[in-house]
Amino acid sequence: MPEGHTIHRLSKDLRADLSTGVVTSCSPQGRFEYGASVINQKALVKSEAFGKHLFLTFSEETILHIHLGLIGKFRPQPLESEPSDTVRLRLEGTRAWHLTGPQKCALIPQEELLEVVDELGPDPLRRGGKWEDFASGLSNRKTPIAISLLDQSVIAGIGNVYRAEFLFLLGIHPERPSCDLTQSELRDLWDVSVSQLRQGVRLNRIVTVSQTDSGTAAGRLKPEDALYVYKREGQLCRRCDSLIKVTKLAGRSCWWCDSCQPS
């Protein structure tokens, strides 16, 4: 599932491509034909992301809500490209954008947007996000911190890759109870979320391995060298000689290093 940096980067790119005039839209697949007709030939007023939710506002009562879910893609294409019949929505500005396989693609009023946002925890990529709000959401939670980080009501935009990488970067074992983390650790967790997600937006991909550990700038790292622990079970830790381990927490795999993240 795309994580918060992807949605914020999408919001930024869509704003740049679609804000130059009226937007042309259609639904080659046919499943969003009415919604596409409502949007067609309207100007984009606002493009914004909250966690993993994308909102494109055309008027107060015409807001496109997109959640990509597990398999959704929203990718730019040349204007002259022909959409396949799997494209739920095609938007045209300076480029065409093809939406396929989304979990959510619907027109909603302003009231529903506010309801969705109210259910989310603080987003490290949004102005006004506070580490204190993040910390307060964990103060009474006994669940492992790795599980809490995937709860979008605790912190918005974090997914399976980032949660494993953040915990490694801070030396926190994924099974530690959330309420046992110190205020200092929670502040550090928030700060690393902000810095890493911002880097993810800039690079348009997740790169957590530092230049100190790799000898290479983040933007130049190959995908197989970009992460510390995610999907690296059985391989050597990049900071010690231990093997990376994996376990299931609430049905989701989580990776860690026993030496760098002692229990």
Image (tube, rainbow, N blue to C red):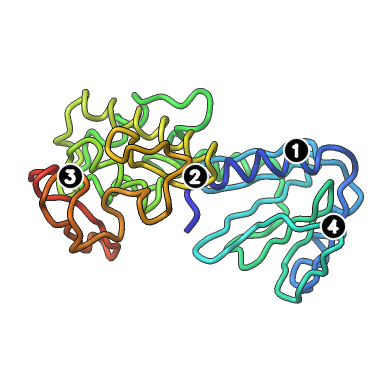
Q: Nearer the viewer, mark 3 or mark 1?
A: 1
N-term-proximal mark, 2 vs 1: 2
Q: Tell whether 232 sits left or right of 34.
A: left
N-term-proximal mark, 3 vs 4: 4
Disc 4 secondary structure class: loop
Q: Residue at x 25, y 57 (%)?
A: 254
Quarter of the figure with residue 116: top right
N-term-proximal mark, 3 vs 1: 1
Amino acid type of the residue that numbered disc 3 sits on in the rendered structure: Lys
Mark 4 crowd level (few <14, some 14–19, many ≥20, 10 Å Cα): some
Q: Nearer the viewer, mark 2 or mark 1?
A: 1
Disc 2 secondary structure class: helix
N-term-proximal mark, 4 vs 2: 2
**Which of the numbered marks, if any, corresponds to residue 16?**
1
Q: Nearer the viewer, residue 88 or 148?
A: 88
Q: Position of residue 241 (x, y in %)?
A: 11, 50
Q: Position of residue 153 (x, y in %)?
A: 40, 43
The residue that disc 2 covers is 4
Amino acid type of the residue that numbered disc 1 sits on in the rendered structure: Ala
Q: Residue at x 66, y 38 (%)?
A: 12
Mark 3 crowd level (few <14, some 14–19, many ≥20, 10 Å Cα): few
Q: State the CA–CA distance, disc 3 to disc 4.
A: 51 Å
Name of the residue lying farthest toward the front: 215
N-term-proximal mark, 2 vs 3: 2
Q: Are marks 3 and 4 in contact (CB under 8 Å)?
A: no
